[in-house]
Image: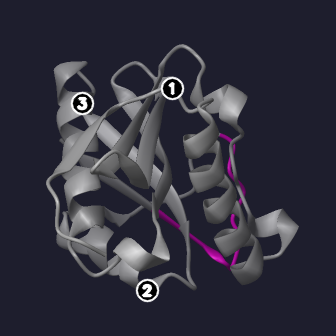
């Protein structure tokens, strides 16, 4: 992957290129987890009011995404953290996470929570390094042996 400047900003998840990125994310997670342990949100939910969807691009090409949706006043859930396989290992996940937290702070969100799978050690390590800590299931999630729930106060 060439080394152009990376931009991260809010975008409409309904764009064809972004839909392809979401489809890659779906395929990745479906290969790791059974349907009952996959908590994917669709494009319509990602485009809904109260949701912020960010895309990382290099030279106009979509490389990764991250989103949050409000689940209570001052509390958001992170969704759709994904970096294409050919763009991993360059710190893009960390940059997406930092951009998401900045977008949340600018909207007076004081806490972000997330659900991730136990078969994603790189993601878990990133979240832990960024200050996310284990928490109980939230916002209607049920306990799942394949899920890990984390939260962070901003």
- Residue 90 at what x, y percent from top left? 22, 76
Which element carries disc 2, helix, strand or loop?
A: helix
Residue lying at 63% horizontally and 38% vertically, measured from the top left: 16
Q: Nearer the viewer, residue 6 or 44?
A: 6
| Residue linked to disc 3 | 103
Instruction: Identify the mark nearer the N-term, 3 or 2.
Output: 3
Between the residue at mark 1 and the residue at mark 2, the CA separation in whole angstroms equals 29 Å
Instruction: Identify the mark nearer the N-term, 1 or 3.
Output: 1
Reply yes or no: does residue 39 show up in magenta.
no
Q: Is residue 115 left or right of residue 4?
A: right
Which element carries disc 3, helix, strand or loop?
A: helix
Q: How is the image coloured?
A: one colour
Q: Is residue 94 left or right of residue 30?
A: left
Which element carries disc 1, helix, strand or loop?
A: loop
What main secondary structure does the magenta stretch of the protein show?
Answer: loop
Q: Nearer the viewer, residue 72 or 21?
A: 21
Mark count = 3
Q: Which mark is residue 143?
A: none
Q: Which mark is residue 121?
A: 2
User: Label 3 near label 1: C-beta < 8 Å?
Assistant: no
Query: Alpha-carbon neighbours of circle 3 within 10 Å: few (<14), some, or many (≥20)?
Result: some
| Residue linked to disc 1 | 12
> As drawn, which residue projects farthest toward the right?
35
Magenta span of residues = 140-149
Residue lying at 33% horizontally and 24% vertically, measured from the top left: 74
Between the residue at mark 1 and the residue at mark 3, the CA separation in whole angstroms equals 15 Å
Quarter residue 25 falls in = bottom right
Reply yes or no: does residue 147 show up in magenta.
yes
- Residue 145 at what x, y percent from top left? 69, 79
């Amino acid at each position: 992957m060439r080394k152009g400047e990376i931009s991260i900003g809010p975008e409409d998840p309904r764009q064809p290129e972004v839909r392809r990125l979401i489809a890659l994310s779906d395929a990745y997670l479906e290969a790791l987890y059974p349907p009952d342990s996959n908590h994917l949100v669709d494009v319509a939910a990602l485009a809904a009011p109260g949701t912020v969807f960010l895309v990382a691009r290099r030279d106009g090409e979509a490389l990764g995404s991250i989103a949050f949706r409000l689940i209570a006043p001052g509390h958001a859930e992170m969704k759709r953290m994904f970096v294409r396989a050919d763009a991993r290992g360059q710190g893009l996940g960390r940059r997406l996470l930092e951009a998401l937290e900045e977008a949340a702070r600018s909207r007076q969100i004081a806490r972000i929570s997330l659900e991730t799978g136990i078969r994603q050690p790189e993601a878990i390590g990133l979240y832990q390094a960024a200050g996310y800590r284990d928490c109980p299931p939230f916002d209607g999630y049920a306990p799942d042996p394949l899920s890990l729930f984390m939260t962070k106060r901003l």
